[in-house]
Image (spheres, rainbow, N blue to C red):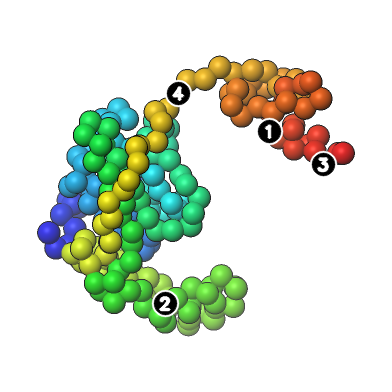
């Protein structure tokens, strides 16, 4: 498998869902594609994804694999890494895809430097145009690459995360809003939702 095996229609669906084209989306497309090849498309909770980033690429994962935030079979672990782990409940298969782009020489250093200047909001218009060109080129290289050159595929030990469970809700005794029990806190004999609990904390 060399470049992306997805059809133009599939790529357009991802693009429409996300709203813009960017390198992060290209990474997510390739990770999603790899997941489809290894695990098949997720039926109801059959395949679970754990993503270690909450950036652009996760949108592609949702569209392509059927692991979605709303179904509860897409979980975010806030580790800030470009890594995507998939579990299949039926047979316990589990793999982590870590994006390194080692096989294509890694991200361009000039692009990284310009990205930093963009974060600091000090880009000149010329630099901005240059950065856009580099980002477009980088996205194309990601789409054209062999997945083996993009991701380190690692075995995963341990069971998949728990199934999404329906839990009882309790009314918060400060704001009255119903809140899933596991997200409530007890304070001074009262049951509070997290925002009300944090508010209490600040006032003391
Ligand atoms: Zn994006
Ligand atoms: Zn409350």
Q: Which mark is residue 50?
A: none
Mark 4–mark 1 distance (CA, rounded to whole Å): 20 Å
The answer to whether mark 2 and mark 1 are in CB contact below 8 A is: no
Which residue does the image show at 39% across and 44% down from the upper left?
A: 50
Q: Does label 1 point to a residue whose CB lies under 8 Å from ligand 2?
A: yes
Residue 29 shows up from this direction: no
Between disc 2 and disc 1, the foreground one is 1
Q: Picture coordinates of residue 136 (x, y %)?
A: 34, 69
In this rendering, position of residue 87 left or right of residue 77: left
Taking the image as shown, residue 88 lies to the left or right of residue 194, namely left
Residue at 19% across, 40% down = 40
Across and down, in percent, residue 51 comes to: 40, 48
Residue labelled with disc 2: 111
79 shown above or below 167 = below
Q: Give the side of residue 166 with respect to residue 3, left or right.
A: right
Query: Mark 2 or mark 4, which has the lower sequence index?
Result: 2
Q: Report whether residue 8 is seen.
A: yes
For the residues labelled 1 and 3, say whether their Cβ atoms are less than 8 Å apart: no
Image quarter in which the N terminus is found = bottom left
The residue that mark 3 highlights is: 202
Q: Give the farthest residue toward the front.
A: 157
Q: Earlier in the sequence, mark 4 or mark 3?
A: 4
Query: Does dot 3 land on a helix, a strand or a loop?
Result: helix
Point out which mark residue 194 bears: 1
Report the quarter where the C terminus lies.
top right
Residues at marks 4 and 1 touching, judged by CB atoms closer than 8 Å: no
Alpha carbon separation for disc pair 2 and 1: 41 Å
Say which of marks 2 and 4 sits in front. Answer: 4
Pointer 4 residue: 165
Q: Give the Cα distance between marks 1 and 3.
A: 12 Å
Mark closest to the chain's N terminus, 1 or 3: 1
Task: Please report the residue visible at 40 percent of the width from the left and 80 percent of the height from the top.
Answer: 109
């Amino acid at each position: 498998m060399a470049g992306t095996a997805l059809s133009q229609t599939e790529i357009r669906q991802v693009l429409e869902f996300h709203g813009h084209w960017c390198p992060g989306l290209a990474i997510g497309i390739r990770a999603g594609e790899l997941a489809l090849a290894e695990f098949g498309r997720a039926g109801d909770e059959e395949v679970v994804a754990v993503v270690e980033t909450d950036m652009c690429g996760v949108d592609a994962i949702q569209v392509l694999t059927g692991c979605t935030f709303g179904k509860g079979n897409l979980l975010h672990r806030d580790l800030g890494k470009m890594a995507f782990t998939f579990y299949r409940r039926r047979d316990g298969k589990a793999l982590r895809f870590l994006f390194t782009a080692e096989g294509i020489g890694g991200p361009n250093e000039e692009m990284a430097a310009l990205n930093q200047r963009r974060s600091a909001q000090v880009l000149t218009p010329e630099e901005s145009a240059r950065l856009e060109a580099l980002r477009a080129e980088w996205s194309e290289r990601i789409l054209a690459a062999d997945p083996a050159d993009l991701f380190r595929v690692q075995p995963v030990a341990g069971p998949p995360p728990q199934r999404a469970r329906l839990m009882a809700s309790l009314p918060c005794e400060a704001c009255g809003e119903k809140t899933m029990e596991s997200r409530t806190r007890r304070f001074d004999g009262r049951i509070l939702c997290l925002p009300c609990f944090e508010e209490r904390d600040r006032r003391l």
